[in-house]
Amino acid sequence: MHFRDTKRKVDYVLAYHYRNRLARPLPGMGSPGRTCRSASLALVSNGGTGKGPWPGLPGVEVIKLNPLDALEEEKRLQREEYERNLVEAGLEIEKDPENKSQGLSFVRIHAPWQVLSREAELLKIKMPTKKMYEITEEEGVLKTLNDIWCKLTEPLQPQVPQQENTKMKNLSYPFSREKIHLYNIKDRDTFFDNATRSRIVREILKRTSIKARNSMGIGTLIANNVYDAAYPLHDGEYEGQNDVINERKLLYQEWARYGVFYKFQPIHLIRKYFGEKIGLYFAWLGLYTEFLIPSSVVGIIVFLYGCITIESDIPSKEMCDQRNAFTMCPLCDKFCDYWNLSSACATARASHLFDNPATVFFSIFMALWATMFLEQWKRLQMRLSYFWDLTGLEEEEEHPRPEYETKLLQKKLKNKNITTENPNGHEKEKLTWSDRMPGYAANFGLMLFMVMLTFSAVFGVIVYRITTAAALSFSSNETTRSNVRVTVTATAVIINLVVILILDEIYGAVAKWLTEIEIPKTEKTFEERLILKAFLLKFVNSYAPIFYVAFFKGRFVGRPGRYVYVFEGYRMEECAPGGCLMELCIQLSIIMLGKQLIQNNLFEIGIPKLKKLFRKLKDERSEPKEMDINQSKDPQQWDLDYILEPFTGLTPEYMEMIIQFGFVTLFVASFPLAPLFALLNNIIEVRLDAKKFVTELRRPDTVRVKDIGIWYNILSGIGKLSVIINAFVIAVTSDFIPRLMYQYAYSQNGTMHGFINHTLSYFNVSHLKAGTQPQNSLFAQDVLFCRFKDYREPPWSPNQYEFSKQYWAVLSARLAFVILFQNLVMFLSVLVDWMIPDIPKDISQQIKKEKTVLVDFFLKEEHEKLKLMESFITHDKRKHKSGTRSGTKSRRSRAASFSQLTRSPKGSFTSFSSQHTVV
C-alpha cells in the first residue's frame, strides 16, 4: 500500500508491458549484444540504415530497429514524457526496474498534501469543518415507532463502525486553502480518505497531456496501448490470517458473503469505499428488494385465493363435467378427430389459478406499488444526498473521450490547409452534425434491422410450433397425439429462452458499437446513449414472445370452414380451451426464471472467472521465465489488483434489474408469483454483486453523482406502460370481462351456470371443406354439429357464422374496461405521487438549518477577522501619535504580522503553516 519508504501512500497505479530490445549495432560500431535503452544513446529509425556515428555526437550509435521495436520505443518515450509531466504537476512517482527482456511493470503514484489541497479546491470537494450542529430528530409517534423498529432490526444491522455521535453532523464546505484553519484536520495523511485521494489523482491523470499524437489524458494513452491499465488500489486483502481490519475486509465480512444475506447493507461504508455512484446503485437495489417483500406476500395471497376457490369455480366445473358432452371441432385438418371439451379439464382448472377476480385487484395494487416505490426512492435519494453532502452538487466539466479527440484531430488535419489560408478562422473546432451523419444513419438502419431480427425470431418459433404440432398430430402413438400441446408449448418456450439469451449478448455488443460510431463527446453522453439503445433492443428481445402470446395468439385463427392458413396447409395456432392466459403464465415464468438463473447468476459468476483465467494464462505465456532479483516473494497489492477484472460500469447491473422490473410489473396480471421469484433472485443478486465488487473487480474510480440518472426515467416509463398492458391483459387475454358480461347481462339467474355453453358457437360439420374432415373418426357417425370458442351466429341463423350481438357487446365492454382501468389507476398513481412529498420533511428542515448554520459560521469568522484588523489599526494609530522611531519600527513589524492575515499575491495564506504556502 506504500512506496518503498513505507511512509508515502500509493494513491494510484499505472501498469504497462515493456519489451527491452537488444541492440544490433552495424559492423564496426561497438560491442554486439549491448542493450541500449536510453533515448540519449540511440538514434531511432524505423528500418533505416546507419552510416556510422552521428555527426557531432561521438560515441552515439545508430541502431537499426524493426517496426515492432520502433513502436515499443515510441511508447517508451511517450511514457517518459507523460510521467515527467505528472511530476511537474506535483505528483510523486515510483517505478519498478525493467530488468527482464520483457514483462509487466508498474508506476506507483503518490499525491502529497500540497497537490491534494490544491486539487480539492479546484474540484470544490466538500470537506468537514470544525463546526458541528445537531440533527433534529422526529418527535411524537414517529420517533416511538422508529425506536421500536431500530430495536427489532438490531440483529439485522451490519457490524461496521458507526459515527461516534449520530445526533451531530459536521458542517461541510467546499475545500479552500484560504480557510484551512476552519476544517477539521486532525491528520493530514488521513484528512482526505483513499477514495478522495484516488479521485484527485485520476483528475490529474485525465488532464495531463503529451505532445505525441496530441494525446490528452490517461484514457487516450490506454486506448493507444501505451499503458495497459490505471486503477486505484484496494485497501489490502479481503481475507487472510492477519488481524488488521481494513475497509475491504470489513465489507467482505459484513456484506459480500452469502452467509449475511439477512443483514441490511452498510450503505455508508459502500459509498465511502466505492464512491457515490456505486453507493446509490446498491441503495436503489436494496430498496427495490425490500419493496418486493409486500408485493410477494400479496402475490402469494392472490395465488392461494385461486387455489382455494378452484373447487367452487362454476365454469371449470362445467368444463370438467362428463355429462356436458360438448363435441368440439377438430384442432387440425384430416388427421385430428372431434374431441370432448371435458378432456381439457386440467387446463381449465389450472387457468383459474391465475384467471380470477383477485388478479384485477393485484394489477391495481402493483401499479400503485410501482408509483410508491419510485416516490420512496426519491425520498431515500434526497436523504442520502443530505448525509453524503451531495446537495447543491454542480455538474463537473467532463473531459472529451479519446475516440472523440482522435476524430477531431483527423478533422483538424483534413482542414489544415483551409485554416492556413484563412487565418481569421480560429474558431474552436468541434464535431458537427454532418460529421456524425454516417454514424446516425448506420444507427437507424441497424437498430431497425435488429428489431426486425427479433420479430423474425419470434415468427420462426411460431412456425416451429405450427409445423411441430401438425407433425405430432400425424403420429401413430396415442400418447404423443394426446400431449401435442404440452410438448409444443414447453419446447417452444425453451427455444425462445435460448434465442433471447443469445440475442441479448449480441445486442449488448451491437449497442456499444453503434454508440461508438456516433462519437459522443463525453463519457456521460456515451453512457446515456448506450443505455437507451441497449434497453430498447433488450426490451424488444425479452418481451416480444410474451407480447405475441398475450395479444396476438389465437386472434387470427378464422373459424371452422374458413381457417387462416400459413404456408398453404398449416393452420394458425389457437389458444388452449382454457384461454391463452395459462400459456402466457408459462411463457413468462420460464423466460423470467431462465434469464435470472442463467444470465444474471451463472454468466455473472462464470464469465469474470474465465476472463481472469484467460488473462493470467496470456500473461504467463507472454512473459519469459526469468529470475527477477528485485521481486519479493509475496505479491504486492498492485500485482494482486492487476489480475482482477477491470470495472466496466454499472450499465449491465442496472439493465438486468430494469428488465426484471418489467417482468414484475408489465404482465403481473397473468403471473402473480413474479414478485416472489424476483425477491428470491435479488436476495442472491445483492450478495453476488457485492462479492463481485469486493473480490473480483479492480477498485473503481469514485464518481460523485446526485441521482441514478436516466434509469429513473426508464423505471417511470415502465411503470406507466405497465398500467396500459395490464389493462389489456385483463380485458383481452383473460376471461374476466366475458364472465362479468354473462353474469350480469345474459345469465337467467345471475350465476355463472351455463357460461361455457354461452361462449361456444355451433358449426355444421357438413360445411367443412372437402378433404379437411377427420379420417377414421372414433366418434359416432351422427355428429351433426361441432362447437368452437367464439361469439358467432349458429348455422340455422340467416347470417350464419357472422359475429353475433354478444361479440360486439363483449368487445365494447373490453374497451370500456381498458379506459376505466387505465384512468382509475393513473388517477390513483398521481394521488399517491401528490400525497408523498419528494423530500422528507426532516431532511428539508435540516437542509435549511445547514444553510443558516453555514452563513452564521462564516459571518462569525469574518466578524472576528474584522475585529482583529480594527484592533491592529487602533494600536497603530496610538503608536503613530508618539512619533518615535521605535514606534515606526513596531508599525513595520505589526504590518508584517497583519499581512499574514491577508492573501499573498500568489493566492495562498502563509499565517498558519509554512506548508500551506503557494504550491
Image (cartoon, grey):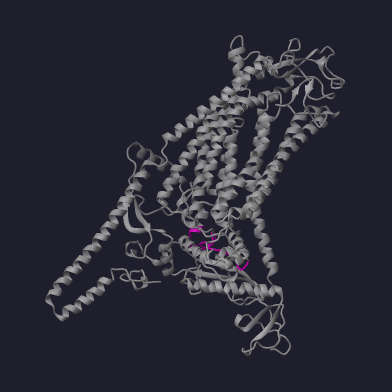
Tell me if residue 831 comes above or below residue 748 in the rendering.
Answer: below
Q: Position of residue 90 (x, y in %)?
A: 46, 71
Nearest to the observer: residue 300 or residue 560: 560
**Highlighted magenta segment, given as a residue range:** 225-248
Q: In which image quadrant can residue 612 be found?
A: bottom right
Nearest to the observer: residue 875 or residue 115: 875
Nearest to the observer: residue 302 or residue 531: 531
Tell me if residue 108 comes above or below residue 743 in the rendering.
Answer: below
In the picture, the quarter occupied by the C terminus is bottom left
* Residue 546 visible from this viewpoint: yes
Residue lying farthest to the left in this orientation: 882
Q: Position of residue 886 (x, y in %)?
A: 16, 80
User: In the rendered view, does 698 fall on the left or right side of 909?
Assistant: right
Q: Position of residue 59 (x, y in %)?
A: 63, 89
Tell me, yes or no, whether the highlighted magenta stretch contains residue 236: yes
Query: Magenta span: helix, strand or loop, mainly?
Result: loop
Nearest to the observer: residue 634 or residue 694: 694
Q: Position of residue 152 (x, y in %)?
A: 43, 41
